[in-house]
């Protein structure tokens, strides 16, 4: 089905992004999988190419684009090449909206030029051992010093995407106790310099998939964070985190659809080349029906994503809309990738085949950014249930 949301400028940008990834990521990706993270120089090259400054205002070295569609193209082209570049997406799509919305002019002057150039990579640290999706249960604490010049940060975070390569991390910490009336009160966001004494990167966690992206444990022992590095008002962290949830879930939906499309392309090509019982596997009715089902699923998911992209650009994408898109597309991704792996037979289970990586990479899509169960809860609430 023809997509109607992109114009000639978008498609020219898509070509340049694809060329960049084919040159700067694909040849090195196997090495990144082995070392558990991309080379940091990759991000500087992405900055030079302009990928990291898409929505950064021009006065800070970016392109100043208002539309998220260009970001979506970056995600789509990476997924179509089988590249899991989660830290890049966290930097570009998750962190930047907080900086643009909440940071002071002085903070923007300090942080955004390096952000756009890829010389200062950002991550965000919310999840803690034992808290999961319950952000109100955060225990990491930040106590204001007696002289009021800095916070003293203590605690631990886990599952932090991009945590190993990050230069700055947005850490959600409790600056005052929660109240019985509001468990969400008392949270603040501190933009922590990763070279600070007491800041420590723990294990780069071994995952089922997403082997090329660093997913780390972090710990903080009496880390001094200047008050000038607090993002927004003290105690307002939880309300800030809610502002970007819709786009965060849209990001995951964009990736899910693109990865499903990549799986279909791999299965189509493989079954046309592979023979069984004297004919191409693609010649069997079952193969045709399975791929037709996958194609129909993909088109439905693409239509949902494209509508959501339009709404997001108009600032009309609701939390329930985003939850529905993420729920449907990530569940669809799981179905489609599984069927496409099945069409590869035993070779689909081999790590050297990209379909195997797409399968293991896909599983977390129904967990991070809010589980499928959380998405259903949001949708049900919007229905008045």
Image (cartoon, rainbow, N blue to C red):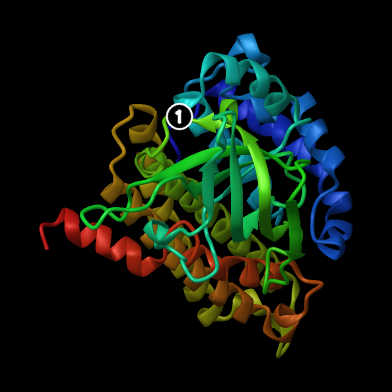
Q: How many numbered callouts? A: 1
Horizontal and vertical percent for residue 169?
64, 42
Nearer to me, 305 or 111: 111
Residue at the extreme top: 59
Above/below status of 101 relative to 174: above
Apparent side of residue 115 relative to residue 90 in the rendered image (left or right): right
- The picture quadrant where one finds residue 315 is top left
Horizontal and vertical percent for residue 220?
66, 53
Apparent side of residue 55 relative to residue 195 in the rendered image (left or right): left
Above/below status of 302 relative to 15: below
Label 1: which residue?
Answer: 232
The residue under the point 61% across, 25% down is 54
Above/below status of 360 relative to 124: below
The residue under the point 59% across, 28% down is 149
The residue under the point 70% across, 90% down is 277
The residue under the point 37% across, 61% down is 327
Picture quarter with the C terminus: bottom left
Horizontal and vertical percent for residue 309?
41, 37
Nearer to me, 180 or 272: 180
> Does residue 296 appear in this view?
no
- Mark 1 is surrounded, within 10 Å at the Cα level, by few (under 14), some (14 to 19) or many (20 or more) other residues, namely some
Horizontal and vertical percent for residue 21?
77, 41
Residue at the extreme front: 146
């Amino acid at each position: 089905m023809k997509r109607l949301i992109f114009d000639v400028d978008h498609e020219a940008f898509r070509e340049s992004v694809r060329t960049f990834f084919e040159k700067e990521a694909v040849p090195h990706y196997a090495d990144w999988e082995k070392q558990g993270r991309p080379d940091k120089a990759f991000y500087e090259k992405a900055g030079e190419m302009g990928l990291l400054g898409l929505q950064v205002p021009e006065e800070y070295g970016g392109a100043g684009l208002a539309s998220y569609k260009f970001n979506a193209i970056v995600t789509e082209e990476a997924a179509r090449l089988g590249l899991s570049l989660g830290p890049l997406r966290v930097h570009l799509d998750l962190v930047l909206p907080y900086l643009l919305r909440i940071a002071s002019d002085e903070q923007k002057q300090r942080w955004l030029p390096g952000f756009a150039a890829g010389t200062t990579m950002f991550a965000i640290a919310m999840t803690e051992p034992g808290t999961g999706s319950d952000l109100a249960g955060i225990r990491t604490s930040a106590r204001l010093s007696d002289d009021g010049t800095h916070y003293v940060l203590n605690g631990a975070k886990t599952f932090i995407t991009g945590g190993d390569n990050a230069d700055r991390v947005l850490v959600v910490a409790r600056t005052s106790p929660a109240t019985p009336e509001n468990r969400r009160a008392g949270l603040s966001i501190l933009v922590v310099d990763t070279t600070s004494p007491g800041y420590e990167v723990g294990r780069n966690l071994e995952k089922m998939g997403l082997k090329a992206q660093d997913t780390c444990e972090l710990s903080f022992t009496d880390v001094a964070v200047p008050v000038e590095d607090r993002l927004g008002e003290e105690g307002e962290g939880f309300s800030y985190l809610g502002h970007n949830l819709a786009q965060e879930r849209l990001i995951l939906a964009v990736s899910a659809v693109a990865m499903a499309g990549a799986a279909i392309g791999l299965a189509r090509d493989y079954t046309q080349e592979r023979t069984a019982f004297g004919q191409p596997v693609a010649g069997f009715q079952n193969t045709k029906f399975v791929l037709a089902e996958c194609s129909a699923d993909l088109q439905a998911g693409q239509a949902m994503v494209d509508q959501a992209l339009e709404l997001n650009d108009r600032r009309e994408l609701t939390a329930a809309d985003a939850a529905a898109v993420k729920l449907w597309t990530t569940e669809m991704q799981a179905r489609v990738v599984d069927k496409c792996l099945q069409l590869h037979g035993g070779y689909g289970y081999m790590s050297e085949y990209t379909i195997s990586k797409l399968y293991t990479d896909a599983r977390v899509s129904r967990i991070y950014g809010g589980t499928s169960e959380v998405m259903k809860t949001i949708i049900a609430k919007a229905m008045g249930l």
